Amino acid sequence: MAAKQVTTTPFPDQKPGTSGLRKKVPVFRQPHYVENFVQAILDCIPDRDGATLVIGGDGRFFNREVVQIAIKMAAANGIGRVLVGRDGLLSTPAASCVIRKHGAIGGIVLSASHNPGGPEGDFGIKYNGANGGPAPESVTGAIFERTKTLTEYRIADAPDLDLGTTGTHDIDGMSVEIIDPVADYAELMHSLFDFEALRRLFASGFRMRFDALSAITGPYAKAILEDTLGAAPGTVVNGEPKPDFGGHHPDPNPVHAHELFDLMHGPDAPDFGAASDGDGDRNMIVAPGLFVTPSDSLAILAAHAHRAPGYAGGLSGVARSMPTSRAADRVAKKLGIEAFETPTGWKFFGNLLDAGRITLCGEESAGTGSNHVREKDGLWAVLLWLNILAATGQPAQDLVRAHWAEFGRDYYTRHDYEEIDSDAAKRLMEGLRAQVASLPGTQIGGLTVSEADDFRYVDPVDGSVTEAQGVRITFAEDARIVYRLSGTGTAGATLRVYIERYESDPARLEQPVAEVLAPVVAVARELAQIEAITGRAEPSVVT
Ligand code: VG1
Ligand code: CO
């Protein structure tokens, strides 16, 4: 067997977004499309000769084919060893864990996360570096530049491997180890959490439901929650990963995980409900009768993390993405630790985690994580919640209410306008940018603008600057609106409008969210002229 050099021509559209390259499956299935992008990634890995590379994905449609291609291309490009999850599966946090644990130079992670899968669904390819985290903008930028000049790629002329059983193979001198996708991750979880206390919790009759939405976390959640911690069989539902997620939209929010949401709001609600997304890095937490916003979840976890063995020494700092509510900042202030505000996307937390400036971080989009890996981690968040519940003996809903009583409540909602016209979306954002300088001091819809800007991030660790990360408008009445365009969509543009209002009056902590936020929502629509510019009177998804 030998490597082939294949002549190719560049594709103009291989620019990675918030989290890697995401496109519709038919785009990825164009001849040479996957190979070009993988070659560009490999070309941007210095010192790859003889190095270890991790390959795996969320199991969605086309995952297997791309895993085979990536393995053969790694062999033809000097990689010494590849670690692949059995059946080509690795959740995103598990891939991060495996990269770190085995000293890999990086990993190729195949996922379109919370986007639907299938022949007409979405697919994605992402590169993570040696720290286990998504490549920073400097690297994704270099990969994109490389895609524009590629004239050939290299691929081993070898048959497909049987990925179904663990074991070691050889392709042209490169060793391919097919590993259990759960083992390393489960061991890491064991090192962070008090598994004995969790076993006692379940043995005492504590009931939960974990909805894997027919995506990657099923095997992880079953192995840890049911097989190791003794949660009742059937705790994990939709636990078989399917290429099309069984028709589910694998996005753990009240809209797409509505079965869990409804169960938790009904008479038969168990003590705790959780769900994860397509690639296992997101989490949704629902207490009986009470949905916990991801922003609140981050704040609550930050306040109580020291109760889990892995965080017993306290936190060095916390970070949140800019549109995430400021609830975590209030906890940081009380703890006397640093709080950081980063652009959307996990790649911006990497430097802070590597430098030891933060221990926990999170995003409003149901992402929470810590320094244990360099990705957000859905099941980890669930286990930290469970560890806190076990340690405090408090029901989840009481913990949330106690948190609000102490810190006040950040009422929060996100309105998504999906698949709007790309030009209209650009015009809308430009219109907002043009207003920011003159907005402070103006009154609108009963609110007074105190500050307005287009978020610009200066990385506190390496000084790199990232411009134009979203328009944020803060009001004197403790409210805030943020506008930005999604960087993960695959059709048209998606406008995200993040709306929040802080309330500390003990008598006003349990108001209906929509009611509290209605005046801010009205201002958000008016300021951006959403209907006039996009033709949409209402958002397509409200979470
Ligand atoms: C979205 C979320 C962002 C998240 C990203 C990747 O990005 O808003 O918070 O980091 O998805 O998550 P955007 O650009 O569409 O708003 V995942 O679970 O898709 O890897
Ligand atoms: Co995800």
Image (cartoon, grey):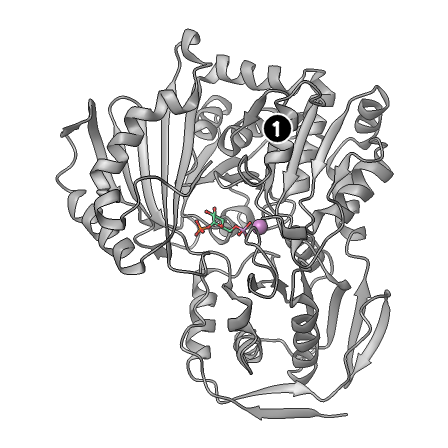
User: What residue appears at the point 84 percent right and 28 percent down from the top-left corner?
Assistant: 199
Q: Residues within 10 Å of mark 1 (few under 14, many from 20)?
A: some
Tell me, yes or no, if residue 379 can be seen here: yes
The quarter holding residue 360 reads: top right
Give left or right: position of 138 versus 67: left
Say which residue appears at 56% left-offset and 19% top-offset. Answer: 400
Query: Most extreme residue toward the top, as rendered?
Result: 507
Residue 310 appears in the picture as rendered? no
Quadrant in which residue 302 is drawn? top right
Question: Residue 144 lies in what quarter of the image?
Answer: bottom left
Give the camera-side residue of 310 and 64. Answer: 64
Q: Judge whether 489 appears above or below 55 on screen.
A: above
Quarter the N terminus occupies: bottom right
Q: Nearer the viewer, residue 162 or 472?
A: 162
- Is 165 left, or right, of 365 in this rendering? right
Q: Measured along the vertical axis of the image, is residue 217 above or below residue 105?
A: above
Q: Amino acid at mark 1?
A: Asp
Residue 192: x %, y % from top left: 73, 37
The residue at the point 51 percent across, 72 percent down is: 27
Q: Residue 52 placed where, x, y %?
A: 70, 70
- Number of labels in the image equals 1
Residue 379 or 44: which is nearer the viewer? 379
Horizontal and vertical percent for residue 513?
42, 23
Using the image as rendered, state which of residue 291 and residue 367 is in the foreground: 291
Identify the residue under disc 1.
262
The image shows residue 322 at horizontal and vertical percentages of 39, 41
Q: Is mark 1 within 8 Å of ligand 2?
A: no
Q: Secondary structure at mark 1?
A: helix
